[in-house]
Image (cartoon, rainbow, N blue to C red):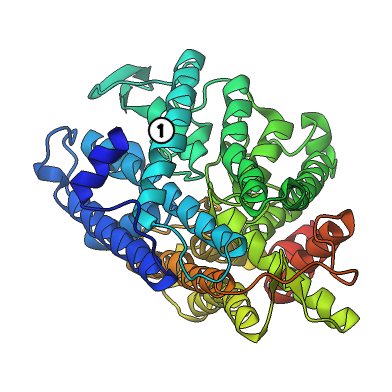
Amino acid sequence: RVEKWIYKGIGANPNTEMRWPAYLRGVLAFSAVSVLFLYLLQRLQGHLPGSLGFSAIDPDQAFNTAASFVTNTNWQSYYGEQAMGHVVQTGGLAVQNFVSAAVGIAVAVALVRGFARSRTGELGNFWADLVRGTVRILIPLSVVAAIVLVACGAIQNFSGIHSVGQFMGGSQQWNGGAVASQEAIKEVGTNGGGYFNANSAHPFENPTPFSNIFEIFLLLVIPFALTRTFGRMVGSLKQGYAILATMATIWVGFVALMMWTEFAHHGPAFQIAGGALEGKEQRFGVGASSIFAVSTTLTSTGAVDSFHSSFTGLGGGITILGMQLGEIAPGGTGSGLYGMLIMAVIAVFIAGLMVGRTPEYLGKKIGTREMKFAACYILITPALVLVFTAAAMALPTPGHSMTNSGAHGFSEILYAYSSGANNNGSAFAGLNADTQWFNSTIGLAMLLGRFLPMVFVLALAGSLAEQKPVPVTAGTLRTEKPLFTGLLVGAILIITGLTYFPALALGPLAEGLAS
């Protein structure tokens, strides 16, 4: 009944099927309106109730923030508790946390329909997928998660700014907010934008070791669970389990590497502390912080419970590489599934070349047209990351924002554009990104990195849906078997490594090997 009221309010007929161009127009139109609305809300903040006395956000920062939250990136070049009032936080940013995640789910479901359907170009209805993802999945999970976080000690109120205690002759000021509810959808929707500048390292957002583990669970649950949705829709749960195994293998491998780099005892300071404790919360420790860092960068969450700039050289490189894989292990809400399915198409194509057979995946032939769409998808994001990083390093002004020089300073820039273009949103915490250059270029990277890949995902979905299913024969590659999982993991690592290795060698690898 609630969904019917929503459809009536927006003038949409959920029973109307869309071909991929119409589906794409719906995604782009909704997102464009969302960017405009959020931009105007920030620019008018000084005239709104509940602004806590904060003035309007500057135009370049308002554009950056609007692009950030609409693209599910949630990159923040501002101090949340010193810039955004209750209306912008709750009525603007939190709303986009829900709908941007729902857009990702909608596009993923449209691609799965492309595999599941035949002899039709119809991929469902974007407006119905958007509403159902929000009402049936994101809101119920977030309500439960918010209650758990409040029980753990996260705050949930609309109080104003108030002084707390006396410190060195002065008082410390804090403002309240609907933190628990925003924290819940921040993690469930793999968003990452924190109410406070310290993000999930702040005790108001993430009070206890249990809440920390709970938030890790929240940011992983939907991306991993969507693999079962995929299996059910294509009529084979084993296919979904193969994708799940691929995601889990990469995630476990990255966690093991991160644990090794952060617990490695290089020097007396690390030996005394028991690990690389700089930049990490004492209540979480090295182990939980390492798991959180891997989980947030392998998804498109971007939330942090420690400062990634303070990780060891190789540990920081692992966080960068996690984003550069394409946010697919398990990736963002929806975007992780469709990114992994694109990689599966490429892996099948590589396997077909090796055995001299026309590649097939889930009964659909992977021909020239499908490979062009997949190739364009995997080329867009690396091009954005590397071109913008090169420009920032070549021009004189952006370099002034670097806190560190040398390899670590380069890693700050590389991390920023990897985070923006891959729609992650976390930062190395050593770069002053609140400048016109970084607000504009990272904002542009976020928009292009989100919506250009969606064009090719939906075009591929439309092409697959029009095909006639190919019968399974003795020569068909069994894509539900462990052999294919291994092939897929190898393809992902090799493609990413060949693309980004030179840049990684100049930054985190050089720093890690020198330490």
Q: Residue at x 45, y 66 (%)?
A: 122
Horizontal and vertical percent for residue 72? 44, 52
Judge left or right: residue 281 versus residue 394.
right
Q: Could you tell me which quadrant the N terminus lies in?
A: top left
Of the residues shown, which amino acid type is indicated by label 1? Ile
Residue 484 quadrant: bottom right
State the image quarter where residue 294 is shown: top right
Residue 151 in percent (x, y) is at 48, 13
Give residue 370's position: percent from left, percent from top. Answer: 62, 78
Q: Nearer the viewer, residue 210 or 110?
A: 110
Residue 162 visible in the shown view: yes
Q: Which element carries disc 1, helix, strand or loop?
A: helix
Image point (79%, 63%), residue name = 488
Q: Is residue 233 above or below residue 196?
A: below
- Could you tell me which residue is drawn at 19 percent across and 45 percent down? 9
Q: Which residue is mark 1?
A: 139
12 vs 317, left or right, is left
